[in-house]
């Protein structure tokens, strides 16, 4: 099974970089024939270009929810996002709309997509480091992604 | 006070907010676009080696990283006083044409087409790319994805990475391309030319063939008189990668033509207390507020501006399309803001044709792609036409090439005054006597700035990948009149 681990976010925008840091820690830990580790700060249709051809994709990204606690980790599936299928930006579509588009077009979409999302606070100030509350959960997310790959018992959403 | 909030404004990334203020009679007195600003970028760059900036600056914005990569690379050429060899310049332009196709295709099919193919007042659940393919056919969606992927492949091969290019160096490129790669690019470019033609045909059939849409495009809601700015080649034809900056007045007369390095003599930056974004204006005309016309220094950049300042397109089919647009819309310059979309399609065809020309130029595989810098670095300006308009990178370094100062003037900021004015104008025409705005009406206000393909605080990809833009309508006392909300999760 060809797997892509994709860390999303801007590596120099504080907490937005959390996905980047998680996948950096995963580089070199897997058989490169089977698992590709990649980071990107692109979105929408550009993501579709990256996802095609993989059987399984694990996305790591930051998230901001209304009542979230900073550092909280969520293990999500695309269907967990109850977003109307609007396009989401002036340039592009949301991840969910992108996946839907790929499906409707009959493209070779990944059979399984898992999203690890980390509740963050600062996505406004430039900086290469996450804030401490986010930084301290990075090892945990790394372990969760690694265990996901082993196909063992799936980690559950942390409360 | 009355306030209308359209919650996550569809298709706007970054926490944008439109505030609309009503007068005593419930008519629109003022409308402002407000966006947040990422902080500390200049400081982040200071003290780093200048040759790192082509890899750092694309991180400002995940939408047009290649534009920043190229503008930044050109600025480092200037800082080191080095002229890249011809093959390097051609390779950069080839890469850059692929980027323009990649970006413009997304904007047209994903953002503009929903308003025209599905309809400006259609249910937002349908007014999106999925609605577009439902109307025009799945195979069109497939073609969009295919040609995006082609453009992406070309950028990845030249750029050295799938997403964040590392090819640009002071004095040239990190590596040449092989004959095999060139031949592959050529086939892809041929297909992209066909797709470029298809886009214009689709526009012809769906938009120009519908009188209602043509009336919207040419009508007063979306018309604004301003100056225009863009880059032109030696023959005054549109060029994305290299040339002089030309400015025309609202009558289409050239009022300035300058070298990118001289931009400070031509562009001033006004600030307003209510906005993080600056308000660039033409220094020689002066800042007269958010006003239309010849006495106001407000200018516009991006596709329509580029076509308005140029004498034409440098490739044959794009030239034909260019002539058709101006004859259809009544000559130059065109002030119809929604014609930005048409201009964008003409630029896709031009970028594809130019891409093919460069792929067929054998010099593009010349292995000599780097001139090693020998001069002491100090200061330099690099400019390209980003998909959204003229992009200036200006760096100062110490004698070791460590960054002391960075100034960037990005396209969306240059269009900031005009976007505010376009929004106000649309709001004034569409919201009258306190009539509560409907979703469809507010979408038509959104269309006024979507035409500019704005790129507001857009680096963040925090899930779910869409940030809200509120439209708030307030009455004279400042109370919120109305608020339409679509949710984030």
Image: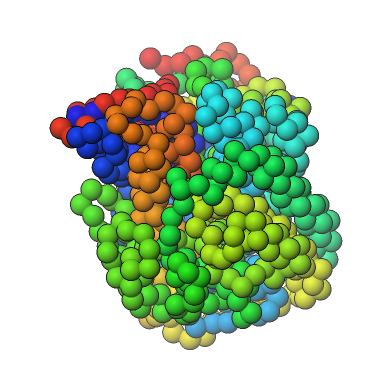
Give the total number of marks visible in the rendering. 0
Q: Is residue B211 visible?
A: yes
The residue at the far left in this view is B477
Could you tell me which residue is drawn at 29 percent across and 70 percent down?
B286
> Can residue B147 be spotted in the picture?
no
B289 relative position to B318: left or right:
left
- Residue B31 x/y as whole percent: 30, 43
Residue at x 75% of width, y 37% of height: B140
Left or right of residue B478: residue B313 = right
Near-viewer residue (B287 or B211): B211
Locate residue B171, reporting x and y percent: 57, 77
Measured from the top left, where is residue B453 in percent x and y? 50, 48
Q: Quadrant of residue A139?
A: top left
Quarter of the image with the N terminus of chain B is top left
Q: Is residue B452 left or right of residue A71?
A: right
Task: Name the colour scheme.
Answer: rainbow
Near-viewer residue (B236 or A9): B236
Q: Nearer the viewer, residue B64 or B163?
A: B64
Q: Residue at x 35, y 55 (%)?
A: B417
The relative height of residue A40 versus residue B438 in the rendered view (above or below) is below
Where's the C terminus of chain B, which quadrant? top left
Residue under the point 46% across and 52% down? B223
């Amino acid at each position: 099974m060809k797997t892509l681990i994709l860390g999303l976010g801007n590596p120099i925008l504080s907490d937005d970089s959390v996905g980047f840091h998680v996948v950096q820690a995963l580089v070199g830990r897997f058989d490169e024939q089977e698992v590709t580790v990649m980071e990107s700060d692109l979105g929408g249709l550009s993501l579709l270009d990256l996802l095609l051809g993989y059987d399984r994709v694990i996305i790591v990204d930051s998230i901001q929810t209304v009542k979230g606690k900073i550092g909280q980790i969520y293990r999500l599936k695309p269907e967990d996002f109850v977003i109307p299928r609007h396009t989401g930006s002036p340039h592009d579509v949301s991840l969910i709309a992108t996946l839907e588009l790929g499906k409707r077009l009959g493209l070779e979409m990944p059979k399984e997509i898992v999203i690890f999302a980390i509740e963050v606070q600062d996505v406004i100030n430039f900086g290469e480091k996450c804030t401490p509350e986010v930084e301290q959960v990075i090892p945990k997310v790394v372990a969760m992604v690694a265990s996901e790959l082993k196909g063992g018992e799936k980690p559950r959403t942390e409360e | 006070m009355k306030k209308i909030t359209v919650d996550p404004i569809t298709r706007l990334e970054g926490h944008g907010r439109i505030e609309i203020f009503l007068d005593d009679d419930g008519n629109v007195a003022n409308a402002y676009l407000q966006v947040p600003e990422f902080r500390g970028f200049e400081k982040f760059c200071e003290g780093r080696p200048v040759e790192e900036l082509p890899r750092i600056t694309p991180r400002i914005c995940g939408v047009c990283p290649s534009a920043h990569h190229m503008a930044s690379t050109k600025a480092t050429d200037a800082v080191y006083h080095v002229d890249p060899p011809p093959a390097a310049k051609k390779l950069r332009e080839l890469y850059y044409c692929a980027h323009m196709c990649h970006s413009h295709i997304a904007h047209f099919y994903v953002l503009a087409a929903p308003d025209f193919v599905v309809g400006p007042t259609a249910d937002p659940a349908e007014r999106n790319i999925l609605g577009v393919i439902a109307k025009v056919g799945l195979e069109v969606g497939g073609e969009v994805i295919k040609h995006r992927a082609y453009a992406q492949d070309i950028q990845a091969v030249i750029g050295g990475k799938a997403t964040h290019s590392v090819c640009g160096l002071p004095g040239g490129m990190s590596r040449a391309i092989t004959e095999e790669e060139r031949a592959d690019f050529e086939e892809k470019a041929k297909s992209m030319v066909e797709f470029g033609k298809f886009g214009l045909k689709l526009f012809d059939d769906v938009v120009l063939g519908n009188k209602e849409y043509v009336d919207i495009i040419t009508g007063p809601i979306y018309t604004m008189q301003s100056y225009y700015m863009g880059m032109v080649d030696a023959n005054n034809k549109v060029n994305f990668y290299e040339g002089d900056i030309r400015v025309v007045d609202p009558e289409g007369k050239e009022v300035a033509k300058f070298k990118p390095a001289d931009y400070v003599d031509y562009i001033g930056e006004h600030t307003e207390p209510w906005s993080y974004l600056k308000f660039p204006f033409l220094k020689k005309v002066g800042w007269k507020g958010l006003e239309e016309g010849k006495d106001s220094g407000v200018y516009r950049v991006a596709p329509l501006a580029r076509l308005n300042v140029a004498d034409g397109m440098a490739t044959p089919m794009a030239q034909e399309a260019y002539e058709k647009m101006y004859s259809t819309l009544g000559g130059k310059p065109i002030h119809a803001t929604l014609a930005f979309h048409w201009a964008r399609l003409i630029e896709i065809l031009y970028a594809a044709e130019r891409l093919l020309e460069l792929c067929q130029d054998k010099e593009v595989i010349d292995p000599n792609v780097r001139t090693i810098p020998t001069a002491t670095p100090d200061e330099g300006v690099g400019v390209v036409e980003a998909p959204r308009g003229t992009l200036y990178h200006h760096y100062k370094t110490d004698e070791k090439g460590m960054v002391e100062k960075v100034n960037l003037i990005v396209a969306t900021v240059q269009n900031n005054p005009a976007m505010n004015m376009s929004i106000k104008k649309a709001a004034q025409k569409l919201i009258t006597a306190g009539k509560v705005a409907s979703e469809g009406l507010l979408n038509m206000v959104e269309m006024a700035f979507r035409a500019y393909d704005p790129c507001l605080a857009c680096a963040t990809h925090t899930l779910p990948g869409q940030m809200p833009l509120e439209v708030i309508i307030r009455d004279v006392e400042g109370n919120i009149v109305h608020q339409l909300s679509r949710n984030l999760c």
